[in-house]
Image (cartoon, rainbow, N blue to C red):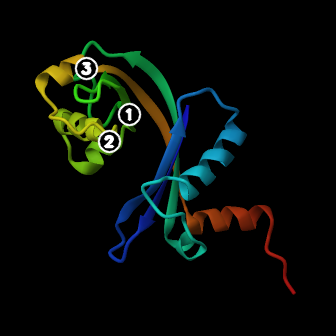
Amino acid sequence: LLFVTWKKRDGRGELALRGCIGNFSDLQLVEGLREYALCSALSDNRFDPVSADELPLLEVSVSLLVDFQPATDAFDWTVGEHGIRISFLDPVTRTTRSGTFLPEVAPEQGWDKRATLDALVRKTGCRGLVTDDLLASIKLVRYRSSKTSLSWDEYVQVRDSIAPPATS
């Protein structure tokens, strides 16, 4: 029940998504962090793999997902407080679609509930209209997360305090 998110600082100092992959299964924390830190940096198919040149510009966040609750409908959650996981039957392809947004996604994008749901339906691969009927068919689970972040510079400080660099 963890997600690892990489963001990259641009020329203006703004952070932009660089990779995010996680899992809704119970994992051993150390192994899960190792696996998903690498997977989200190197295997998120929305992005090229992170290169060594990018490391100084990166920030990594780890979100541990907690407090899962089934919602009464697609709008039974609070922007900025809850992450959402949806599933529904695609009316065009007749296949089940599912997806999630972590709690910070909607406020970072400036979305209200409807815009968040529209974007998440699109993220699942659904290409039809996002109608009121489709929204009514969504099964939604809301959750919270405990999140911590670390910049490359902070990582180097911690690493060097644990195992100072070798001197010649």
Find the residue positioned furthest to the right.
168
Find the residue positioned furthest to the top.
72
Q: CA distance from mark 1 to mark 2?
A: 7 Å
Q: Quadrant of the C terminus?
A: bottom right
Provide residue 58's location: percent of width, then percent of height: 50, 65
Q: Quadrant of the N terminus?
A: top right
Q: Amino acid at mark 1?
A: Gly
Would you name the residue on which mark 1 appears? 99
Give above or below for 77 relative to 37. above
Q: Nearer the viewer, residue 127 or 33?
A: 127
Looking at the rendering, which quadrant does residue 120 occupy?
Answer: top left
Q: Residue at x 24, y 34 (%)?
A: 117
Q: CA distance from mark 3 to mark 2?
A: 20 Å
Q: Residue at x 31, y 23 (%)?
A: 88
Provide residue 5's location: percent of width, then percent of height: 49, 50
Q: Earlier in the sequence, mark 1 or mark 2?
A: 1
Find the residue positioned furthest to the left.
132
Whether residue 135 appears in this view of the structure is yes
> Is disc 3 in contact with disc 2, using a CB cutoff of under 8 Å?
no
Q: Amino acid at mark 2?
A: Lys
Q: Nearer the viewer, residue 125 or 78?
A: 125
Q: Amino acid at mark 3?
A: Asp
Whether residue 85 appears in this view of the structure is no
Would you name the residue on which mark 3 appears? 76
> Is disc 3 in contact with disc 1, using a CB cutoff of under 8 Å?
no
Q: Residue at x 35, y 24 (%)?
A: 87
Would you name the residue on which mark 2 appears? 123
Bin the neighbour count of mark 2 within 10 Å (Cα to Cα): few under 14, some 14-19, many 20 and up.
some
Q: Identify the secondary structure beneath mark 3.
A: loop
Which dot, 3 or 1, sits closer to the camera?
Answer: 1
Q: Identify the secondary structure beneath mark 2.
A: helix
> Is disc 1 in contact with disc 2, using a CB cutoff of under 8 Å?
yes
